Image: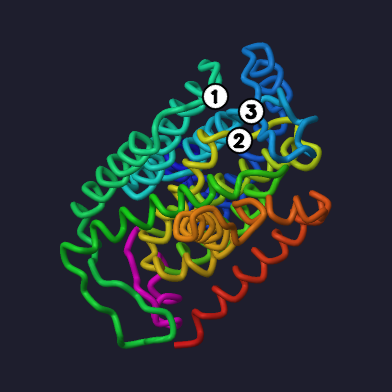
Amino acid sequence: MFYHLLYPLSSEVSVLNVFRYITFRSVWALLTALIITILIGPWCIEQLRKLKCGQYILEEVHAHRDKAGTPTMGGLLIAFSLLLSVLLWGDLTNPYVWLCLFVFFGFGAVGFVDDYRKIRCKNNKGISARAKLAGQALVAALAMAGLVTLPAYSTEMIVPFFKNFTPDLGFFYLPFAIFIMIGASNGVNLTDGLDGLAIGPTIVAGMCFAVLIYVAGNVTMAGYLQVAHVPGVGEVTVFCGAFVGASIGFLWFNAYPAQIFMGDVGSLSLGGVLGFLSVLCKQELLLLVVGGLFVIETLSVILQVGWFKFTGGKRILRMAPLHHHFELTGTPESKIIIRFWITSALLALAALSVLKLR
């Protein structure tokens, strides 16, 4: 809104020319989302408490008993702050921005239905895994259907470390991209098990993709770093700014001991849009490094379940996902969270360094 209202006046008021810069608007999108989240957070927590949107707690983890009843569905707070910030600071004629909003709210809608069912059903069962997967696949497929209509769309896949190896997947790029989004969405969802555990790495990944998106949208930088240039995608940096700001604001209340949990409405939307951001900047494989913590948590579940079935009841870990295993070994929750955050930051730095290793 500010971009469309104030930038046209820059010919008369030169200082307003600052609104043309993506970096300026991205920083203010971050600050706006952060401030909004912190200001309305207490009210949101109180409303969720009145609606009895309490979090279900795993009985196997005795240390979590005190968390029972903590308001969940805090992803709604992130969604509101992000949307308002993007509408204020973004170029609303940019199709990539609208596709990001569609993915975020589409995956969030699937999570909302799941959360609502868990809260209202006495047996704590949300929608079935098959229904959840179908909803995620539908949103991802619609997003990709919109993306392929844009002229800058490419089915080539960038492979880290290899400058001239960019295989064109053709039609198979669509299911590949859909898989990336669904995988990232469920990865964040599985990681969301301790206070601030998932939102911390999400913030790190959001900041990392803000850099990657900006580079991909800037023809000079993309040429220098020899990465794919996607005309127009740089505007999504503003979305990334709002994404990070809203997430930091949520962490204000979600940090240990948490006053609110994000629920599936938050984790599915955050993870899904991270996957889509990797598709937009043609760094799908690099997401495995940027979101390496989510990958590790997901693999811990797959290995645990697979080994349990293969051996007829034996386990690799005391409990999956991995963070619960560490809890059951006696490691304090706060120490697990901080160590996972450090791991996430190191992985993001490693991912950014790959841009020059080609």
What amino acid is found at the position of numbered circle 2 in the picture? Answer: Met
Q: Residue at x 39, y 32 (%)?
A: 128
Q: Earlier along the polypeptide chain: callout 3 or callout 2?
A: 3
Which residue appears farthest toward the front when viewing the image? 312
Along the line of sight, the residue nearer the viewer: 204 or 84:
204
Mark 1 vs mark 2: give the one in front: 1
For residue 5, side relative to residue 179 (left or right): right
Question: Quick one: quadrant of the C terminus?
Answer: bottom left
Q: Which residue is mark 3?
A: 56
Q: Position of residue 63 (x, y in %)?
A: 79, 39
- Residue 141 is at least partly visible in this image: yes
Q: Residues within 10 Å of mark 3 (few under 14, many from 20)?
A: some
Task: Judge left or right: residue 175 versus residue 16.
Answer: left
| Up-down relation of residue 288 to residue 2 (above or below) | below
Mark 1 residue element: loop
Q: CA distance from mark 1 to mark 3?
A: 7 Å
What residue does disc 2 label?
A: 262
Residue drawn 72% across and 42% down?
195
Where residue 159 appears, x then y in whole percent?
37, 78
Range of the magenta residues? 217-232
At 79% from the left and 42% from the top, the residue drawn is: 256
**Label 1 sits on residue:** 124
Q: Answer yes or no: do the residues labelled 1 and 3 have beta carbons within 8 Å?
A: yes
* Whether label 1 touches label 2, CB < 8 Å: no
CB atoms of marks 3 and 2 within 8 Å: no
Residue 11 appearing in the image? no
